[in-house]
Image (tube, rainbow, N blue to C red):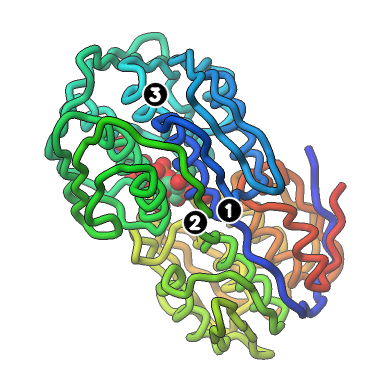
Amino acid sequence: MSGFVINGGKKLYGEVELQGAKNSALPILSATILTKGDNILYNCPELTDVDACLRILRYLGCEAKEQNGALVLNCGGLCENEIPDSLMREMRSSIVFLGAILARTGYAKLSFPGGCELGPRPIDLHLKALKKMGAKIFERHGSIVCKAEKGLKGAKIDLSFPSVGATENIILAAVLAEGTTTIVNAAREPEICDLCDYLIDAGAEIYGSGEGVIVIDGVRELYGVSHSIIPDRIVASTLMSAAAVTKSSITVNGVIRNHLSSVIPVFEETGCKVSFKDGNMNFSAPEKLKAMPLVRTMPYPGFPTDAQAPLMAAASVCDGTSVFVENIFENRFKHVGELTRLGADINVQGKVAVVNGVKTLYGAKVEAQDLRGAASLIVAALSAEGETQVSGIEFLERGYENFEVILCSLGADVKKI
Ligand code: EPZ
């Protein structure tokens, strides 16, 4: 198990480039299955989740290679439509391949995405929608078999919850389907818009992405294009938390301000100053952070659930009590126990976590148990007095590109072991 050794209490300074968004890269990599010819993806982050995606694409018969810092993907040679359990288990979000493989080949077999650190990860909304589009779905021995021999048909899909993954799978199933698909209560995340922008460039007819209703008119063919992945708003939120807990001023380059519209006010309430110039964010923290306002995680444009853990680490050293309500996932407070080992004072009741800010955190051995929890522990360790050992860094590497290098370039004392 790889780990970080962090000597906390050091101020950060300087500037860093923000990486491409993991949750945009994954569905776009899946979408290349639908295209003819070469796709060139720029700003794709180097992450273990992206590597897992590329392994799946190569297994399916696609070409995927690095070229001058970009990814070149050509799925003309696709000859498989089953993803083996071993590859499915590497990444929970592999379910995003379902819609694309089914739309391209009329058949798809995947194993159920394993539960993950955040609790059960149901896919009922995905399957219900594909059935409405004409897919026949069989579940046996932990696998899902989907058939649409006559192709998929457009349908009106009402989502009971604006699921990001379900919205993505429906879009991927609909762009080559016969007729029109309307998604009501669609997810509005920036990553959905990025996926739609890529598909529209490739020849798809999609209207309303980023709104609650998305309309897709099926077309006959899509062609490979060049596309640059949007920046990662959750990594940006994490860097803001790191600067807040170390009372630092840093600049993060390549930030889309709108993507952080529900995160910035939370930091401003603590006394941090956030300004933008030409797409670069200047962030500076006061010597003493005031408590955060009530933070309730919600579908976009509400406060992002993925930023809850990193910001809770910052709340741990605010002056006063902060309250977090996790409305999206059942089990997303796994980092609380570990933050407590560092001296944080946090009480969890169901989906509510009450954080009583403390003056100082103290270094200790802590263990990450999920991706954003790992980021949370690292943020807390940057503030803690003395040495902290964070194990379980393989979780972090699913979503944060060279994070120890980024933090060291800002003046932190982080060593990877
Ligand atoms: C995406 O997961 C992201 N992952 C998650 O980021 C993110 O936390 C989540 O959206 C919410 O924003 C990727 O994009 C790869 P959902 P996804 O479907 O698609 C329930 C990270 O840290 N649900 O919007 O799985 C589900 O159980 C990761 O980068 C159903 O009940 O999220 C959850 O409670 C973690 N039935 C809620 O909806 C379904 O069929 C949100 O899930 C689908 C989802």
Image vertical order of residue 44 relative to residue 76, above or below: below
Q: Quadrant of residue 73?
A: top right
Residue 222's disc number: none
Q: What's the amino acid at mark 2?
A: Asp
161 or 327: nearer the eye? Answer: 161
Q: Is residue 330 visible?
A: no
| Classed neighbour count for the residue bearing mark 3: other residues with Cα under 10 Å, few (<14), some (14–19), many (≥20) | many
Beta carbon at label 2 within 8 Å of ligand 1: yes
Amino acid residing under circle 1: Arg
Q: Earlier in the sequence, mark 1 or mark 2?
A: 2
Circle 2 SS class: helix
State the image coordinates of residue 290 (x, y, percent, origin top left): 55, 86
Residue 152: in sight, yes or no? yes
- Seen in the picture, residue 20 relative to 259 is either above or below; the reply is above
Residue at the spot 57% in from the left edge and 19% down from the top edge: 59
Q: Secondary structure at mark 1?
A: helix
- Badge 2 local density, few (<14 within 10 Å), some, or many (20+)? many
> Label 2, label 3: how many angstroms apart (C-alpha)?
28 Å
In the displayed structure image, the side of residue 410 where residue 417 appears, left or right: right
- Residue in view at x 28 percent, y 14 percent: 147
Which disc, if any, is residue 101? 3
Image x and y of residue 127, in percent: 27, 28
| Distance (Cα) linking label 3 and label 1 | 29 Å
Q: CA distance from mark 1 to mark 2?
A: 6 Å
> Which residue is label 2 attached to?
306
Query: In the displayed structure, would residue 151 be above or below residue 399?
Result: above
In terms of depth relative to the viewer, which is nearer, 192 or 394? 192
Identify the mark at residue 372; answer none if there is no mark.
Answer: 1
Q: Tell me which residue sits at (59%, 45%) in the image.
A: 370
